[in-house]
Amino acid sequence: MGKALDGVRILDFTHVQSGPTCTQLLAWFGADVIKVERAGAGDITREQLRDIPDADSLYFTMLNHNKRSVTIDTKNPEGKLVLEALIQKCDVLVENFAPGALDRMGFTWERIQELNPKMIVASVKGFGPGPYEDCKVYENVAQCVGGAASTTGFDDGPPVVTGAQIGDSGTGLHLALGIVTALYQRTMTGRGQKVLAAMQDGVLNLCRVKLRDQQRLERTGVMKEYPQYPNGTFGEAVPRAGNASGGGQPGWILKCKGWEHDPNAYIYFITQAPVWVKICNVIGKEAWATDPEYATPSARLPRLKDIFAEIERWTMTKTKFEAMEILNKYDIPCGPILSMKEIAEDDSLRKTGTIVEVDHPVRGKYLTVGNPIKLSDSPTDVTRSPLLGEHTDEVMAELGYSREQIEALRTAGAI
Ligand SMILES: CC(C)(COP(=O)(O)OP(=O)(O)OC[C@H]1O[C@@H](n2cnc3c(N)ncnc32)[C@H](O)[C@@H]1OP(=O)(O)O)[C@@H](O)C(=O)NCCC(=O)NCCS
């Protein structure tokens, strides 16, 4: 079966996490992704957080599946010519260097357009244009400047960053959407364009509900679904909401059987209004269904803490999986807190290709997260990440270089 992006060639100038997640997705959708790496060293993540000596790290292998790797010294004059040949042959250049690095290399937007007017140049940067545009940015910086950290954690503690890589992988996703959109527009205009996904913007986009709450707070001075209500105080900015739900249906994380020794024996429980009566019946508080102090969502808001404490008395008598099974019978929305160990061992995630076992010639078998986006006409086959420079000769031959020319460039240190 063909793939959605068959025929699309990507010059992948990305490194670390944000850019590679973007080009990995494009590769899974069928694009030919040619990763250009620095000769001898490669993407710095190849050696970061290594668990096996001399083998590409999981950090690298899990972000670079289905790509080809070529090594080019793009600061070497002859290496630059190879890169120019690649620019002429590819549809999209994706990069996430520090601001200005591509220009310093000599590949300005104008130069790239001269070489290939159809080229789409897609970049991840920490910030968009403005006072911080020249700053380097990593994941947690993006979480802090995008509004995630100030709104995550508990009221009595410091700001907290989340484990979900919303700054890096989140921005990679945004960039991938920008790229396929630009490719679509190109089918009508015939022109390339610049695509920019700033990490601050990407995180803020994912924190949209918190900017909503900022404006609600300014108008009303109080937000009744926040744990600060009714007894705590609200300041001028959206506070940290602990585990409260971001939506209109209150939720909280509750202890389950075994919580004393298992750090993940918890369940997320949502007191969705339409199933309130069922919740009352399940936890044995039938009277709450008709008691005016509990029967309506607005009556419950000032009592949420006590309500969740009562529900927890019930969840603590069940394991998180037992609670999930019982609650789902009644359509009560909930979710067990799954550990990474449990997720790694989950059969259903393996069956759908969301968790995939991959074999690698140096490191052996390892688990990875496959393509989370499933297309019925473009299935994803996850293949291992490339070794450093594994495809240099192959790609150079495709660009029209002879064996002798390739050897000469290698001797000159250009590739
Ligand atoms: C992530 C980041 C902080 C890393 O910074 P860094 O390790 O110092 O790396 P840089 O991006 O500055 O660039 C590396 C240098 O290598 C050079 N380089 C990269 N590939 C090369 C190649 N194949 N041959 C020769 N030189 C190469 C670049 O030209 C640049 O040189 P310069 O500084 O002289 O211009 C930075 O790239 C960044 O802010 N990126 C944008 C935001 C982002 O994506 N952050 C998330 C990362 S997960």
Image (cartoon, rainbow, N blue to C red):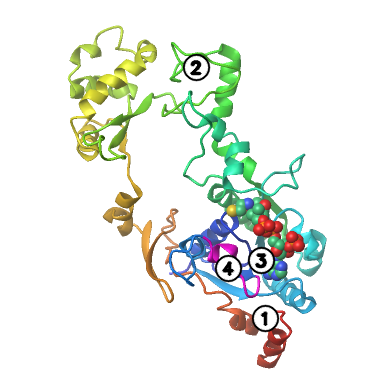
Percent position of residue 275, x then y: 28, 24
Q: Residues within 10 Å of mark 2 (few under 14, many from 20)?
A: some
Percent position of residue 55, x then y: 47, 71
Q: In the drawing, what numbered circle is on residue 33?
A: 4
Q: In the drawing, what numbered circle is on residue 172?
A: none
Q: Is residue 112 above or below residue 294?
A: below
Please name the residue shown 64% across and 41% down the image: 200
Which residue range is magenta in the image?
38-48
Q: Which one is in front, 78 or 259?
A: 259
The residue where tag 3 is placed is 91
Q: Residues within 10 Å of mark 3 (few under 14, many from 20)?
A: many
Q: Which one is in front, 131 or 177?
A: 131
Distance from the alpha carbon under mark 2 to that under mark 1: 61 Å
* Tag 1 secondary structure: loop
The residue where tag 1 is placed is 399
Distance from the alpha carbon under mark 1 to that under mark 4: 15 Å
**Occupied quadrant, residue 308:** top left
Q: What is the three-letter code of the residue carrying label 3?
A: Asp
Residue most extreme to the bottom: 404
The residue where tag 2 is placed is 223
Q: Which one is in front, 171 or 61?
A: 61
Q: What is the three-letter code of the residue carrying label 4?
A: Val
